Image (tube, rainbow, N blue to C red):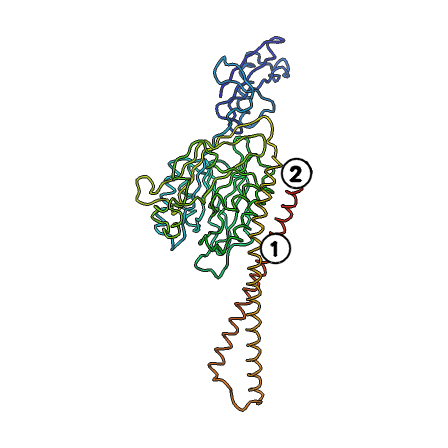
Amino acid sequence: MWVVWVHGSLYGGSLGFGVVLACRKGGERPGVPRALFLPSFLPFALPQPFRLPSLAPWLCPAALCWLLGAVTPTHSLQVSPLPGAACKTPMEGEPTLRLRIFDLNCWAIRYLSKRRQERVRLIGDTLRQEGFDLVLLQEVWSEQDYSDLKVKLAGCYPFSHYFRSGVIGSGLCVFSRFPILDTLLYQYSLNGYPYMLQHGDWFGGKSVGLVIMKISGIIFNVYITHLHAEYCRDKDAYLPHRLVQAWELAQFIRHTSKAADLVLLGGDLNMHPEDVGIRLLRGWTGLRDAFAEATHFEGCKNGCTLVPNNCFTDKSELLPFPLGIRIDYILYKAISSFTVKCEELKTTTGPAPGMDIPFSDHEAVMATLHIQRQGQPAGATLGTADLALADVVTEARTEVGVGLRAAQRQRYSSGRMAVLALLLLLLQAVAALGTLAGLGTEQPFPKLSFCLLAFLALGVLVLATGLHLFHTMEVKMLHGTEDQMWMALRALQERPSEG
């Protein structure tokens, strides 16, 4: 804080004026002071016996300095902190903020992930040393692991949040150097099948988490997510579900980011850069890919985050991709009068420094974003972009339609199975009632076999009914998403004619 007090005598030294230069603690760029021009009328207002002309030059600045911590001036003028430097006003393109982001799928599944606790400790130690501004972690399935990280990182990342969802949790958590103002969680309507136990995505409750922060007066909407895994690219049974998730993610971002200045999205999207889901997400939200926009890149070739030379990676899944695949992303865009550029993007490359193991089966993504203020708010671009986006929405809607028809077939099969199981139970009930009523001379089946058959039919009825209800909900969700895409497609096709 700089304080310069200039006292001018008026009416016998009872009125003074002063200039206080103070560096504001929050909401401004560090090192840029603010100037206050405040008259000291207090001594002048006192009766003559209580006037202290000799103390007036000192009492007023002392009181002002004491109040500056709580009072924010409405009108200010930027000045140089150096004595005698000329004042300057904010200019278009002036540097505003530099933000460092860390994103990682931690692969921390309790009892299943190899060397989980050791790797979680390694991740915490690295984050504490590097000092990022924002950390986005996925697959932190154990709340104990999150609690351990929170304790370890409390000194450098005092603000954090863990998103709880599903049976075993969403696995999403955020650590930040800046205060978190608000949070919100949206769980995707479709997320795999509960009977696919070998995959287990359904139990994870895949979701998108929103964290709202205010950094240097700029409102950030930070989104973190983890979409359904692909497992088999040639026969991807989960593609319709992942497209529904991508659509819901895009809609969630569009409808919750209207009050934000900047939007950030990080996470494991489980989609290649050329996949229809990524093109739909980026086209519908206007998000930009940090890897494609980065001025400087360092890390795995093509920015791959799942590479064959990682000791925890299943090599058989990456046989068609000898260099690996890129499925972890940091996406961003500016909404109001700001521009965002990715100065640098890095990925980890194998084992952590000084260790024989990597952080995870995924490589971490680290981005440095440079945020500047511009003169006018960025306007939306229409025309050719809308026509290209219409093609993407059409392609996505076609895939969702394929999934819808498959879900309808599964609903029909499970319903038919439930009806057959119910008929078998009714036949057994009629036979049992006939025997009890004396209509039959003897039991046609042994009692043990009869009871086992009844229990089997009951189990099939319960299972088939549950599957029928699940696929009924799946049909409704897929049909609803198809309708939403049709409305969006119609709006996109009508825009050029309106212009």
Q: Secondary structure at mark 1?
A: helix
Q: Secondary structure at mark 2?
A: helix
On screen, residue 496 above or below 372:
below
Residue that badge 2 annotates: 496
Tell me what residue is drawn at x 61 percent, y 48 percent: 485
Q: CA distance from mark 2 to mark 1?
A: 27 Å
Tag 1: Cα neighbours inside 10 Å, few (<14), some, or many (≥20)?
some
- Extreme right residue here? 498
Residue at the bottom extreme? 441
Residue lying at 48% horizontally and 25% vertically, measured from the top left = 30
Amino acid on which the number 2 mark rests in the picture: Pro
Quarter of the figure with the C terminus: top right
- Name the spot of residue 360 as percent of width and height, x first: 38, 46
Q: Residue at x 55, y 77 (%)?
A: 424
Question: Which residue is nearer to you in this view: 407 or 43?
Answer: 407
Check if mark 2's residue and mark 1's residue have beta carbons within 8 Å. Answer: no
Closer to us: 396 or 448: 396
Which mark is first along the chain, 1 or 2? 1
The location of residue 241, given as percent across then percent down, is 53, 53
Question: Can you tell which of label 2 and label 1 is closer to the viewer?
Answer: 2
x and y, in percent, of residue 159 in the image:
47, 39
Residue beneath label 1, please? 479
- Asked whether 49 or 477 is in front, the reply is 477
Q: Is residue 94 above or below residue 279?
A: above
